[in-house]
Image: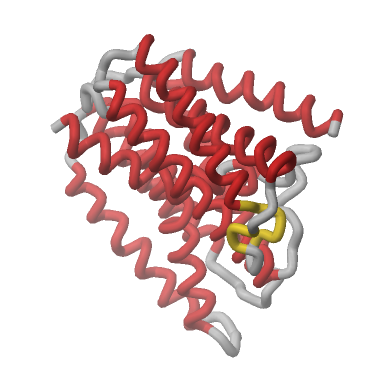
Amino acid sequence: MKTRAITAFFFTIVMLGSIFLGAYTFSAFYLLLSLVALLEFYKMVKIGGIRPHRNIGVMVAAAIYLTTAAYHFFQFELKYLLVIIPLIFSVFIAELYKKNKIPFANISYTFVGFIYITIPFCFFYSLGFLIDFNHYSYHFPLAFLLMLWANDTGAYLFGMKLGKRKLFERHSPKKSWEGFFGGVFTSLLVSALLSLQFKEVEPLVWAGMAVIISCFGTLGDLVESMLKRSLEVKDSGSFLPGHGGFLDRFDGLLIAAPIVYVYLYLLIY
């Protein structure tokens, strides 16, 4: 528990620093984080006998992320994402030269990697430019992380003290409905505090964001648990002592970030 707490403390400092230190630090940090999480995913699925095209997947992921960043920094037109298409379809050609009994499983998991991980990270990254597409603001990314952490903390504490009814025992035996609603409560509490400081949207919109993060963040956690159980692994990696891998720490972001972005975009614009 002590190791877990120390790791969480220092990683939180790094995370907050990446948000507060400006657009370039924010961009570089989450590019690196998304690529590491993708590599963890590809490493995990190899345990199940899948051989994804890791190098092509990483190149496609980096290209998608960098094109998103270029759009925000330099008004780079998103049509240039089309140049990535030949790279994406090179996966099929590369598989022709592999001697594998399940070629389309390898191809599929290569695609799943950057759809499941890279694209959600791009949506989270774009939250920093949602107020003004060409200028960075840390308000929405910071709020997202604070609400997500509040949800995780509340779910853990309420679940530990009050948890009786299993939420989704097949994939996560420790999660309970009491913990889930405790997470929603703490996330809503954080949203109320944020609404006092950040005035971009109304308090009710912040509250809606908190509920979405709690619901879809929990689903993201369950999805990663389903993946790990299907592969019979405990953690996605071992880089963070007491926490596992980066994918373990950001599983809630993967489902929640795209939904939150769409929600805020529709309300703001």
How far from the left and from the top, in percent, is residue 254?
Answer: 47, 48
Q: Is residue 186 left or right of residue 171?
A: left
Q: In the rendered view, tell whether residue 247 sits above or below residue 94.
A: above
The residue most toward the bottom is 101
In terms of depth relative to the viewer, which is nearer, 156 or 73? Answer: 156
In terms of depth relative to the viewer, which is nearer, 15 or 191? Answer: 191
The residue most toward the left is 269
The residue most toward the right is 2
The residue most toward the top is 197
- The quadrant of the picture occupied by the C terminus is top left
Q: What residue lies at 52% left-to-right and 83% top-to-bottom? A: 103
How far from the left and from the top, in percent, is residue 203?
Answer: 30, 22
Residue 130 in sight from this viewpoint? yes
Q: In the rendered view, tell whether residue 222 sits above or below residue 98.
A: above
Tell me how the rendering is colored.
Answer: secondary structure
How far from the left and from the top, in percent, is residue 193?
Answer: 44, 16
- The quadrant of the picture occupied by the N terminus is top right
How far from the left and from the top, in percent, is residue 194?
Answer: 41, 17
Q: Is residue 18 left or right of residue 159?
A: left
In terms of depth relative to the viewer, which is nearer, 101 or 189? Answer: 189
Residue 27 in sight from this viewpoint? no
Q: What residue lies at 66% left-to-right and 38% top-to-bottom? A: 158
In terms of depth relative to the viewer, which is nearer, 172 or 52? Answer: 172
Q: How many marks?
A: 0
Q: Is residue 252 left or right of residue 45?
A: left
Q: What residue lies at 36% left-to-right and 35% top-to-bottom? A: 209
Q: Quadrant of residue 33?
A: top right
Q: What residue lies at 55% left-to-right and 38% top-to-bottom? A: 183
